[in-house]
Image (cartoon, rainbow, N blue to C red):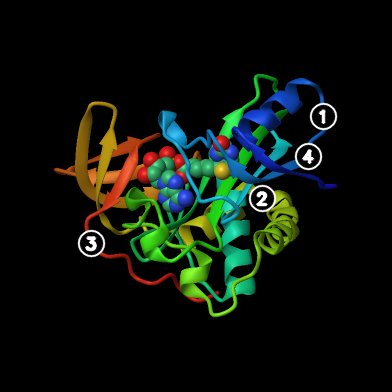
C-alpha cells in the first residue's frame, strides 16, 4: 500500500471527506488527517468530539473486505500497536470498535462503505494530547482517556499516524484468521459478563466467542445469541491486556 497523506486544519468529518474522494475516484491508500472536526461521526448516528488539535483524527481509503469487521480490526490492531510502541500504553480492544485503557476509551474506529464495491473508508479518532481534566467538555471527562494522561512524553498525533500506517501495512497483508486471532488476544470483551444494547432491547450474558465474520457470541439463559451490531457494557472491570 502506498499511503498518500493529506492534512487539513479543520473539516466536518474526515470520513465524510474520504467517502466523497472515493466517489471521485481517488485510489486506495488515500489518507486524510484533520486538526479538528466540526461534525465528527461515531457509529449509529453518534458524534465524535475532541478539543482542537488534541487528537489524531484520520480516515483511510482501504480495499473493500468481504467481512467489513476485518477492516475495523486491522486498523484497531495497528493503532493499539502504535500506542504501545510509541507511548508505552497497552490498550485493549472492546468489541467491536473501541481501544480502551481500563474502562476509559482512548480511541474509536468507524468503517463506512463508499457505495462502490472495491474500497471502503475507515476512520479513527485517537485522543493524544488532551487538556487538563477541568478544561475538558464536562461530558468527555468520565470514561475517556488520552495518551497524554497515560504517558510521560506522549507522541504527537502525526507520530501516532505514521506509526499506525507502518503497522497497518502489515495488518493489511495478514490473513483473516490471523487478524481475528490477534483481535481475540487483545479483546477485553471476550470472557466477560456483558450487557449488549441492541436496537430497542438489551441482552445480558457472557461474551464467549468472536465468529469468523466478527460477530460477538453471547451465552445467555442456556442459549447462545450471535450479535452483529450493538453497544457492549462490560459488567466487570477489564483485566489488563496480555503482554505482546
Ligand atoms: C466510535 O463510535 O467510536 C467511532 C469514532 C470514529 C471517529 C473518527 S475521527 C476520524 C473519522 N472521521 C469521522 O467523522 N469519524 C472518524 P462509537 O462507538 O459510536 O462511539 C461514539 C461515542 O464515543 C460517543 O457517543 C461518545 O459517548 C464517545 N466519544 C465521543 N468522542 C469521544 C472521544 N474523543 N473520546 C472518547 N469517547 C468519545
Instruction: Measure the alpha-carbon separation of dots 1 and 2.
Output: 26 Å
Asked if residue 12 lies left or right of residue 30, the reply is left
The numbered mark, 2 or 3, whose residue comes first in the sequence reads 2
The residue that disc 2 covers is 175
Whether residue 177 is visible, yes or no, is no
Say if 89 sits above or below 37 in the image. Answer: below
Residue at 29%, 27% (x, y): give it.
Answer: 199
Q: How many C-alpha atoms fall within 10 Å of the one at disc 1: few (<14), some, or many (≥20)?
A: few
- Mark 3 or 4, nearer chain start: 4
Q: Secondary structure at mark 2?
A: loop
Using the numbered discs, state the Cα–Cα distance from disc 3 to disc 4 in whole angstroms.
40 Å
Mark sitting on residue 236: 3
Q: From the image, state whether disc 3 or disc 1 is nearer to you.
A: 1
Q: CA distance from mark 4 to mark 2?
A: 22 Å
User: For the residues carrying marks 1 and 2, which lies nearer the camera in this image?
Assistant: 1
Residue behind mark 4: 30
**In front: label 4 or label 2:** 4
Q: Quadrant of residue 222?
A: top left
Q: Which residue is mark 1?
A: 26
Secondary structure at numbered mark 1: loop
Q: Nearer the viewer, residue 184 or 129?
A: 129
Question: Sequence-wise, which precedes: disc 3 or disc 1?
Answer: 1
Which picture quadrant has residue 128?
Answer: bottom right
* Residue 60 in the image, given as x and y percentages of width and height: 69, 41
Which residue does the image show at 59% across and 72% down from the upper left?
Answer: 154
Residues marked 4 and 1 touching at CB (< 8 Å): yes
Amino acid at each position: 500500500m502506498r499511503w498518500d497523506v493529506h492534512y487539513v486544519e479543520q473539516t466536518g468529518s474526515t470520513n465524510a471527506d474520504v467517502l466523497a474522494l472515493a466517489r471521485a475516484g481517488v485510489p486506495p491508500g488515500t489518507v486524510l488527517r484533520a486538526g479538528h472536526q466540526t461534525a465528527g461521526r461515531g457509529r449509529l448516528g453518534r458524534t465524535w468530539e475532541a478539543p482542537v488539535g488534541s487528537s489524531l483524527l484520520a480516515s483511510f481509503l482501504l480495499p473493500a473486505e468481504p467481512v467489513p469487521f476485518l477492516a475495523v480490526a486491522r486498523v484497531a490492531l495497528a493503532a493499539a500497536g502504535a500506542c504501545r510502541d510509541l507511548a508505552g500504553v497497552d490498550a485493549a480492544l472492546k468489541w467491536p470498535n473501541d481501544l480502551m485503557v481500563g474502562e476509559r476509551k482512548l480511541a474509536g474506529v468507524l468503517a463506512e462503505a463508499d457505495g462502490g464495491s472495491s474500497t471502503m473508508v475507515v476512520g479513527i479518532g485517537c485522543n493524544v494530547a488532551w487538556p487538563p481534566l477541568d478544561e475538558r467538555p464536562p461530558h468527555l471527562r468520565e470514561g475517556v482517556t488520552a495518551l497524554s494522561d497515560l504517558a510521560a512524553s506522549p507522541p504527537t498525533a502525526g507520530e501516532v499516524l505514521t506509526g499506525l500506517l507502518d503497522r497497518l501495512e502489515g495488518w493489511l497483508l495478514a490473513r483473516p484468521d490471523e487478524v481475528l486471532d490477534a483481535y481475540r488476544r487483545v479483546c477485553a470483551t471476550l470472557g466477560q459478563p456483558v450487557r449488549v444494547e441492541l436496537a430497542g432491547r438489551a441482552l445480558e450474558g457472557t461474551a464467549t466467542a468472536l465468529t469468523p465474520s466478527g460477530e460477538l457470541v453471547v451465552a445467555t439463559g442456556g442459549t447462545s445469541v450471535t450479535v452483529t451490531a450493538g453497544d457492549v457494557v462490560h459488567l466487570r472491570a477489564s483485566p489488563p491486556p496480555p503482554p505482546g
